[in-house]
Amino acid sequence: MRISKKDEMNMKTPADASTNSTARILLVDDEKETLDLISEYLGEKGFALSESVSAEHAIHLVEQDGYEIAIVDLHLPGMTGSELLKHIKKIRPHIQVIMITGYGTIRDAVECMKLGASDFITKPILLDHLLLTINRIIQESRLKEEAELAGYYRNLSRTDELTGMYNFRHLISLLKSEVTRHLRYNRTMSLAMIDIDDFKNYNDTKGHEEGNELLMRLAHVFRRNTRNCDILARYGGEEFVIIFPETALEETVVVAERICRAVAATLEVSVTIGLAGLPRHTADYNELIRMADKAMYWGKQHGKNRIVVYEDSMSTCR
C-alpha cells in the first residue's frame, strides 16, 4: 500500500527525539516510495540505514552486516515478511524486528510476535509513532545489556575466577543465611571441608599451570557428585567447602565417599574430607567451619585420603 501525499502531510514529527542513536537499521519494503520516505526521515534523526526491496536481498544484507533493528513489510514478493522474520532471527537473533503492513490483521500481528517480532505497525505509517517505537526498542535493549553486565559483575564479585565456585566472602554470607534458616525451622545441615592431599608436591612437580588445571577439574568432580541445592565454594588455596542443606551427617558421609572415589578414579590425587553438622555439633556458623576444618586436619595427620566426622577430641588438632 502506497503512502499518499495527503497521508504524508498528516504525519507528525516529534519536536524532540528521545534517542540520538547511531543504531544501524535495515528497511525492507517492495514499495520504493515507502522506503524513501522512512529512510529520509530516520536518516535525519541520525540513524544509519540500509534498504532492500526483496527478502532475498535482505537476507544477504543480514548475513553480511550487523544491524540492531530491521523494519520489514509483511507482504513481500517471493517470500512473506513472516518467513523473512524467521530467517533474520535464525541468522542474527539479537536483531529487533518491526513488522509493517497495509492490510494486516490481529492474527498476523500475533503470529509475528510469536516469531519474535518486537512490534507491529500498520500503514499509513505515522513517522513519529515509528520513531517512538524504535527509541523504545533501543532503550529496552540498552537496559537489558546494562542488566546483563550488572549481573556479570555481581556474579564475578562472588565467584572464584579459576574454578567458577563461590569465593570465601560469598560462602560466609550464604553460610550465615543457611544456618539461620535451618535453626529457625529446626532443620539439619552438614558442612564438608575438603583439602587436596600433597598438593604442594603436585605443584612443585608439575608446575602451577597444571596445579590450576587440577583445581578446575576437581571443581567439576564436586559439581557432578552433588545436588543443585548444595553450595560449593573455594575456601582458599587447595581447600574447598560444600554446604549440604537439609542433610544429616550420615547422608553426607555417603556423598563424601562418592567424591573421594571419583577423585581417585579421575585425577592423580586424593582428598581428605572433614565433616561437621548443625545442630549436632554447633549452632554457630564459625564453629561449624572450624569443626569441619579440625576433622579434616585430623584426617590429614592420620593417613590422608579419608573422611572424618568431627569429635570433641579433635578440638586441639591443627
Image: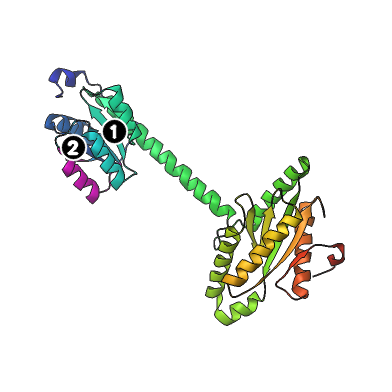
Tell me if residue 37 comes above or below residue 213 in the rendering. above
Residue at mark 1 to residue at mark 2: CA–CA distance: 17 Å
**Magenta residue span:** 50-68
Residue 98 badge: 1
Q: Name the residue at 24% across, 46% down.
A: 62
Q: Residue at x 66, y 67 (%)?
A: 260
Q: Quadrant of the N terminus?
A: top left
Q: Mark 2 belongs to which amino acid?
A: Met
Label whose residue precedes the other's in the sequence (1 or 2): 2
| 316 sits left or right of 266 in the view | right
Q: Nearer the viewer, residue 308 or 62?
A: 308
Residue 185 location in percent, x, y?
76, 40
Residue carrying label 2: 79
Quarter where residue 34 is shown? top left
Number of other residues with Cα within 10 Å of mark 1, as a class: few under 14, some 14 to 19, many 20 or more: many
The front one of 253 and 51 is 253
Q: Secondary structure at mark 1?
A: strand
